[in-house]
Amino acid sequence: MLMFDVIIAGCGPTGAMLAAELRLHDVRVLVLEKDTEPVSFVRIVGLHIRSIELMAMRGLLERVLEHGRQRPAGGFFAAIAKPAPEGLDSAHAYLLGIRQPVIVHLLEEHAIELGAQVRRGCAVADFEQDDEGVTVELADGEQLRSRYLVGCDGGRSTVRKLLGVGFPGEPSRTETLMGEMEVGVPQEEIAAKVAEIRETNKVFSLGPFGEGVYRVVVPVAGVSEDRAEPTLEDFKQQLRAIAGTDFGVHSPRWLSRFGDATRLAERYRVGRVLLAGDAAHIHPPAGGQGLNLGVQDAFNLGWKLAAQIRGWAPEPLLDTYQTERRPVAEDVLDNTRAQMALSSTEPGPQAVRRLLTELMDFDEVNRYLIEKITAIGIRYDFGAGPDLLGRRLRDIDVKQGHLYDLLHRGCGLLLDRTERLTVGGWSDRVDYLADPTAVLDVPCVLLRPDGHVAWIGDDQQDLDDHLARWFGKPAN
Ligand SMILES: Cc1cc2nc3c(=O)[nH]c(=O)nc-3n(C[C@H](O)[C@H](O)[C@H](O)COP(=O)(O)OP(=O)(O)OC[C@H]3O[C@@H](n4cnc5c(N)ncnc54)[C@H](O)[C@@H]3O)c2cc1C
C-alpha cells in the first residue's frame, strides 16, 4: 500500500496552502481532490492584510499581486463605508481582490512546485486510524496509508462526519442567490434602482463586472429544501420581488446560492486526523473572511504537523493548533453574526447600524474592527508578557531588506539586536539574524515559522527555554 506522511482531503485554498507548508519541511504529502477539474465557480474574494502578509512570508506576493486588484483596506465590517484609519500596523495595508479559482490555482501550483502530489477525481470515502497511522479509502475502493490525515474538504466535510466530530451552531435561515449574467436595461436605470434598494437592503447588489456581464447578488427569504443549483427564473422572480423588475437578465455565466449557516467543529483533532478551513468552521461571507481564515489555519498547522513528522515537536505542540485557532474561528463566527444582524432591514438593527456607523468615526473603534476583519489583531495566548508576545510581527525593515523575505523557508527566526545571542543546537530549525539596526523597540524576538512572536528578551538561558518550548530538543 502506498505510504505518505500526510494525506490532505480537499484541494481548496486551505488544502493547497497546507500542502505547500508541509513541503517546506520535506513532508511527503498527497492531496486528494474529489473534483476532476479545478473550480470554475467564480467567487471574488478579498485577501485581507494578514493573508497578504502570509503570501509575502512565503515569496508569493508578486504572483498574487499580479492577479489581483489592490483596494483600500476599510469598509468591510458589515459593509459600513468607513475608510481605514491612518497608520495600520502593516507594510501591506490593503485588500487584494482576487478570484477564488485564481488564488486556489496559485497555491496549488506553489505546493506542486515544492513537491506535493495532487490527485484529482479522488474522493475520500472512508478512513480508519490506528496507533501508527491512517488507512484512507477512496470512493473507488483504493486504499492509501499515511501517518496523518487532514480534512480540508469544505463545509460538508466527509472527514469531519466520519470522525464523528460535532458541528454545532445555527442552520441557514436565509439564502442568497449569486451569479453573473447580462442585463436588458441601461446601466443608469440599474444604478438608480440599486442605490434606492441598498438604502435599506445591504445584501442586494447588481453591478457591471466587465465585458457586459453583471454580478447579481440577491437575498431570498427562507431556505430551499433541496439546495439545488438556482435557475435564471429563480433570479428573475427574486429580482421582481425586491426591485419590482428583473432588469431583463439573460445569458447567465454561472449561478449559485449560499446560505448563512454558522457552525464550529467541537474539536479540530482526533488522534491522527485533523480538520482545517471550512471543514472546521462555516459562516456567512460577511466581511469576506472564510478563505482567509482557512489559509491561516493551514499556516498555523503546517509547521506543527511537520515538526511532529520530523520528530522534533515538543509534546503539546500539535495540540496548540486547536487551542490557538479554534478561538480565532469563534471570534470570526461572532463577528459575522453581528454583521448579519446589522444587515437586517428591520428598524431596530438599522438603528444599531446607524449608531455603529457614528461610533466608527472614533479612530480606536474603526481600528479595532479593521484589525479584527483583517486578522492582524490576533494575539495567541503564550502566557504573561509584553503586548507583542503572541502577536504576529509586521514586515519590518532589516539590514538585508524586508524581514518577511527571510521567512520563505518556513523556519523560525531569532532577530537579535544585541548581537550576543545564539540559536545553538536549534540552528537546523531556527534561522539567526543579528541586526542592531532592525526597526524594533525590543532587544530580540524569536519568531515561529508562522511569524508570531514566541519570545522577547535578551537573556540566553531564557531564550534556550523558549527555543525548547517551541522547537523541541536541540540537536547535538
Ligand atoms: C458567496 C461567497 C463569497 C465569499 N467571499 C469570500 C471572501 O471575500 N473572502 C474570504 O476569505 N472568503 C470568502 N468566502 C468563503 C470561502 O469561499 C471559503 O471559506 C473557502 O473556499 C474555504 O476554503 P476550504 O479550502 O476550507 O474549503 P473549500 O473551498 O470548500 O474546498 C474544499 C475542497 O475539498 C474538496 N472535497 C470535498 N469533499 C471531498 C472528499 N470527500 N474528498 C476529497 N476532496 C473533497 C472540494 O471539492 C473542494 O475542492 C465566500 C464564500 C461564498 C459562498
Image: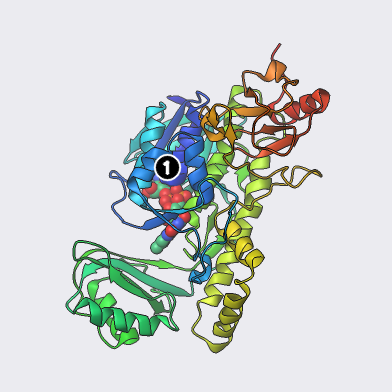
Q: Is residue 406 visible?
A: yes
Q: How many marks?
A: 1
Q: Nearer the viewer, residue 421 or 262?
A: 421
Q: In this view, does 426 lie above or below 200?
A: above
Tell me: 438 left or right of 144.
Answer: right
Residue lying at the far front in this picture: please name it.
Answer: 437
* Residue linked to disc 1: 124
Query: Image quadrant for the C terminus?
Result: top right
The part of the image, by quadrant, that contains residue 435 is top right
What residue lies at 21% left-to-right and 75% top-to-bottom?
A: 249
Q: In this view, does 265 lie above or below 58?
A: below
Q: Is residue 319 visible?
A: no
Q: Is the residue indicated by label 1 positioned so its CB lies within 8 Å of ligand 1?
A: yes
Q: Position of residue 460 (x, y in %)?
A: 80, 23
The part of the image, by quadrant, that contains residue 189 is bottom left
Q: Nearer the viewer, residue 42 or 319?
A: 42
Q: How crowded is mark 1: few (under 14 residues within 10 Å), some or many (20 or more)?
A: many
Q: Which of 95 and 156 is in front in this view?
A: 95
Q: In this view, does 287 lie above or below 129?
A: below
What kind of element bears circle 1?
Answer: strand
Tell me: 447 left or right of 82.
Answer: right
Q: Position of residue 311 (x, y in %)?
A: 63, 22
What residue lies at 53% left-to-right and 67% top-to-bottom?
A: 77
What residue lies at 42% left-to-right and 24% top-to-bottom?
A: 2
The figure's colour scheme reads rainbow
Tell me: 14 left or right of 411.
Answer: left
Q: Where is residue 384 in the image (x, y as percent from the top left)?
A: 81, 44
What residue lies at 60% left-to-right and 42% top-to-bottom?
A: 394
Query: Image quadrant for the N terminus?
Result: top left
Amino acid residing under circle 1: Val
Q: Where is residue 214 in the image (x, y as percent from the top left)?
A: 25, 68
